[in-house]
Amino acid sequence: MTATVEKQTATAPSPRHAASDRSRSEARLGWFLAGPAFAVMLLVTAYPILQAFYESLFDYRLTDPANRSFTGLSNYGVILTDPVWWDAFGVTVLITVVTVAVELVLGFALALVMVQALRALRPILRAAILIPYAVITVVSAFAWQFAFAPDSGFVNSWFSFLGLAPDTDWFGSQGSAIFVICLAEIWKTTPFISLLLLAGLAQVPEVLQEAAKVDGATWWQRMRKVTIPNMRAAIMVALLFRTLDAFRVFDSVYVMTAGANGTEVLSFLAYRQTIARLEIGLGSAVSVLLFISVVLICGLFIKGFKVDLSQARGE
Amino acid sequence: MSTREKVGWGVGGLLIVAYCLFPIAWIVSLSFKSSSDISNGSFLPTVATNENYAQILTGDAAELFLPALRNSFGICLIATAIACLLAMFAAYAIARLDFPGKKLILSTALAVAIFPVISIVTPLFNLWREIGLYDTWLGLILPYLSLTLPISIWTLSAFFREIPWEMEQAAQVDGATPWQAFRKVIVPLAAPGVFTTAIIAFFLAWNDFVYGISLTSTSASRPVPAALGLFTGASQFESPTGPIAAAAVLVTIPVVVLVLIFQRRIVAGLTNGAVKG
């Protein structure tokens, strides 16, 4: 739009002044209206992360504030050479990869069923699928924890035919604890992915599907050659959002294991350093590193997979 | 579609409903178990009892749960209202005006939305203690804006873009004053979008756990998820499982009611903002 305006004004010099005046006042009004929201967003995120970076440069414990001293980047050195960080990093990556992969496949299946389901069933499905999305993560974590816990659950007795002892402690060892954490996360967030994919499915041109059908393509061929390539953007956006969301997993881990038995994730590590151990300097450094990881993941998606975020902006 | 296919997709649909409701049904069932029945190893209680609800509403645990409920409602409503108000102006500017920095504002909203919450908590924990915002409502409302504001800007600008703004001029041509045109034409068109945005933003704030446990220490401001996470039972010998389940059911009810009433709008809001639909 601006281009056309400029073209017109270039040929007719007299209204040019008026047009630029107008665009200037439009810009002023735009920032006047959107500025407060923009400022608040920066205030609640950019400012704290800068503060965190500043504090990460100090050896600073709240229990010993007199001995606060500037140590430069040494906190980062301490963290990056500590296996605690790398263990938490590994667990976080594992949970992220497993949940996002399963959610993508399961979410796609849910979306396909929703597209095909009878008209009468659709409102019921839509309401049902929103419930996991809307339920508090802590509530979902408790529901799954209680289901698997030997003293309150039913899972051990239901699956005793698989050889599960009634006192199987799912949260006692790393593998099984992470399994339950992943289950809870998958249950809670698959609906969100499936809604995004459903919107993507609606964008696949019906004509292409029909044409492929006429040409004798099987269901699987149509899926691979028509449906999925046409909704690539929607899939990528869903993947990006969920990966970043999964990478900051915290609530389920806190509720189910409190990071015990090799289930500590990065968010929990940052929480434990700052809030529980009052190591402001180290905790801040973990926070900054977590932030950098998220930025790197985001950059990887945008550059590596060429996710077009203007798609995400609905433009 | 053949009848057989129809039945197949129908069964698939029912499976989805079961998948979505199963953990909810489980926590409801658990909340009706008596403390001696909790470990019966089966899905349903042997005898249904309301003792858990009595404990969190009028009994020993009431002083933990009820203030948390009040805090959650108050803090989340205020954070949602502020976010929606700010986002309304921003989204109007983004949808209707052409100005440099529009992209910057939307990208910032996206960046804030994917920001790891825990990275904000660490510095705020220290700062809030120094300036006296630790364990206050305001101390949670401010960081909650980092949850509610980006999604509000995002969702609302998608909604506002679809409003036929010409109708405002049309009404003025027909003799309406600018105020009448705004109130009678634009407000009714924009209201559903604003309302939907408010619901989605409220869900995000209502779900928060990290800020809740890190920036509060007493029932003066502790919200429900944090209270649930820190709940340890009336005495150390009593398992808190039943009361936690009952509290979990109670805080899930408002969410389920909102979902049932506004499902169509919520889906539109969620997907409009994220994928062009």
Image (spheres, coloured by chain):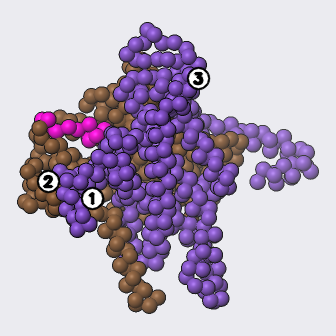
Please state the extent of the stretch shown in magenta in the rendering.
B226-236
CB under 8 Å between discs 3 and 1: no
Please tell me whether mark 3 or mark 1 is closer to you in this view. 3
Seen in the image, is B16 located left or right of residue A41? left
**Which chain can be seen in brown?**
B
The answer to whether A158 is drawn above or below residue B241 in the figure is below
Output the chain of dot 1.
B
B233 drawn magenta: yes
Check disc 1 and report the residue beneath it: B24
Q: For chain A, give the colour.
A: purple
Output the chain of dot 2.
B
Q: Secondary structure at mark 3?
A: loop
Q: Residues within 10 Å of mark 1 (few under 14, many from 20)?
A: many
Q: Nearer the viewer, residue A207 or B193?
A: A207
Check disc 3 and report the residue beneath it: A73
Q: Picture coordinates of residue B128 (x, y %)?
A: 42, 23
Check disc 2 and report the residue beneath it: B39
Q: Picture coordinates of residue A33 (x, y %)?
A: 59, 39
Answer yes or no: is residue B188 visible. no
Cα gap from disc 3 to disc 1, whole angstroms: 47 Å
Seen in the image, is B241 located left or right of residue A41? left
**Number of dots carrying numbers:** 3
Cα gap from disc 2 to disc 3, whole angstroms: 51 Å
Q: Residues within 10 Å of mark 3 (few under 14, many from 20)?
A: some
Place residue B173 in its image quadrant.
bottom right
The answer to whether B47 is drawn above or below residue A207 in the figure is above
Q: Picture coordinates of residue A292 (x, y %)?
A: 58, 37
